[in-house]
Image (cartoon, helix red, strand yellow):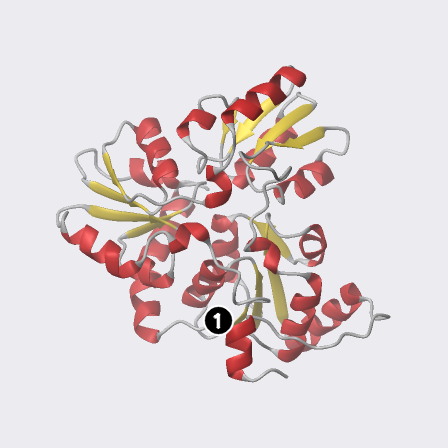
């Protein structure tokens, strides 16, 4: 097995795998042997979604991590998600198939700079989007996801002063929906920032009956065109409940796998980004593969750890989010 230094450098266990192995069967065996559960985000590749015990968005994954009885959590997602699982289940072993599965949005908000930013507004409540590091959560009063951000802001008294970070696009959308004046940190997700309004307009002209659905991390110019704006779970529910037969989807393209499984007769078109690529994949999410997941479970590595003091501080705002969400039935 790789040494600690090699693992940190590469981010994943590198080992030859017998090409005749059925990885789906082997992963199921290992899950039983190790009392492990695989949690996967909607943006993971289809094979990983199909082997997962639970597939969801950030809120659902947090809820599942908090309630699972498994001894080992394999988090097929990105680093901040595995950290959240460790914060909520500190006694469990949390594995991530590739430690380099980071997040451009989390990277856009270094905790030491956010701490200085927060000090300028001492009388403000700090709400941070779950897509951030454990250290940033530890600086927060409440954590939110795109599913519950509006409701969490609305759960606070109207005269509450609020800092919202790190996603400026989600923050601007929440401010618009709630009528609240939020102080925004200037961060963004690179996948949701690259959608091209011009290309989407042309695509809509070619598919006049298609509903255009978008995640609130997209820029305002893109959101203004949307028939529906919602979290990944919200987009999935909308596409299932709508009578429309065609959808243009402005979020990471991994969600389309679940949309097609739930709606085999409907057509889903990924919204075009403003570059030469025809897709809109998150390079971090796609670092995880079925092979890396198998090796990670087999070797019990790479493991995600969070310092004990950060766990204590970061747990409070996450638990506050889960309490508010439970009270609102989210």
Q: Where is residue 177 in the image (x, y as percent from the top left)?
A: 35, 28
Looking at the image, residue 325 lies above or below residue 173: below
Say which residue appears at 50% left-offset and 23% top-offset: 226
Left or right of 260: which side holds 165?
left
Q: Where is residue 262 in the image (x, y as percent from the top left)?
A: 70, 37
Looking at the image, residue 245 lies above or below residue 181: above
Q: Quadrant of the N terminus?
A: bottom right
Left or right of 168: which side holds 69?
right
Q: Nearer the viewer, residue 270 or 69?
A: 270
Numbered label tally: 1
What is the quadrant of residue 232 in the picture?
top right
Looking at the image, residue 137 lies above or below residue 264: below
Please rate how many residues cluster around mark 1, counting C-alpha atoms within 10 Å: few if below 14, some from 14 to 19, many from 20.
some
Q: Which residue lies furthest to the right in this view?
A: 20
Q: Which of 228 and 188 is in front in this view?
A: 188
Say which residue appears at 59% left-offset and 31% top-offset: 271
Q: Position of residue 316 (x, y in %)?
A: 31, 60
Say which residue appears at 20% left-offset and 51% top-offset: 117
Q: Residue furthest front?
A: 276
What is the quadrant of residue 97 in the picture?
bottom right
Q: Where is residue 15 in the image (x, y as percent from the top left)?
A: 70, 77
Say which residue appears at 15% left-offset and 53% top-offset: 119
Looking at the image, residue 328 lies above or below residue 50: above
Residue at the spot of label 1:
304
Q: Which of 91 and 2 is in front in this view?
A: 2
Element assignment for label 1:
loop
């Amino acid at each position: 097995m790789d040494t600690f230094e090699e693992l940190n450098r590469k981010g994943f266990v590198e080992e030859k795998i017998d090409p005749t192995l059925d990885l789906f069967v082997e992963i199921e065996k290992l899950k039983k042997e190790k009392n492990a559960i695989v949690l996967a985000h909607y943006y993971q590749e289809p094979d990983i979604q199909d082997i997962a015990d639970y597939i969801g968005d950030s809120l659902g994954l947090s809820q599942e991590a908090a309630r699972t009885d498994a001894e080992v959590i394999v988090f097929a997602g990105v680093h901040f998600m595995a950290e959240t699982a460790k914060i909520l289940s500190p006694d469990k072993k949390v594995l991530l198939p590739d430690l380099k599965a980071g997040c451009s949005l989390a990277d856009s908000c270094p905790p030491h700079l956010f701490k200085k930013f927060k000090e300028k507004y001492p009388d403000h409540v700090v709400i941070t989007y779950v897509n951030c590091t454990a250290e940033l959560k530890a600086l927060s009063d409440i954590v939110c996801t795109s599913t519950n951000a509006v409701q969490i802001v609305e759960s606070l008294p109207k005269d509450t002063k609020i800092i919202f970070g790190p996603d400026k696009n989600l923050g601007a959308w929440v401010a618009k929906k709630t009528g609240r004046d939020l102080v925004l940190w200037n961060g963004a997700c690179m996948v949701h920032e690259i959608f091209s309004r011009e290309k989407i307009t042309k695509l809509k002209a070619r598919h006049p009956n298609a509903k255009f659905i978008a995640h609130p991390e997209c820029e305002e110019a893109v959101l203004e065109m949307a028939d529906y704006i919602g979290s990944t779970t919200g987009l999935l529910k909308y596409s299932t409940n709508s009578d429309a037969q065609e959808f243009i989807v402005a979020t990471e393209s991994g969600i389309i796998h679940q949309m097609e499984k739930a709606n085999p007769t409907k057509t889903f078109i990924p919204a075009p980004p403003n570059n030469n690529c025809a897709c809109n994949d998150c390079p971090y999410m796609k670092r995880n593969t079925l092979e890396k997941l198998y090796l990670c479970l087999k070797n019990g590595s790479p493991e995600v750890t969070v310092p004990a003091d950060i766990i204590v501080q970061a747990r409070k705002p996450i638990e506050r989010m889960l309490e508010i969400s439970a009270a609102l039935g989210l």
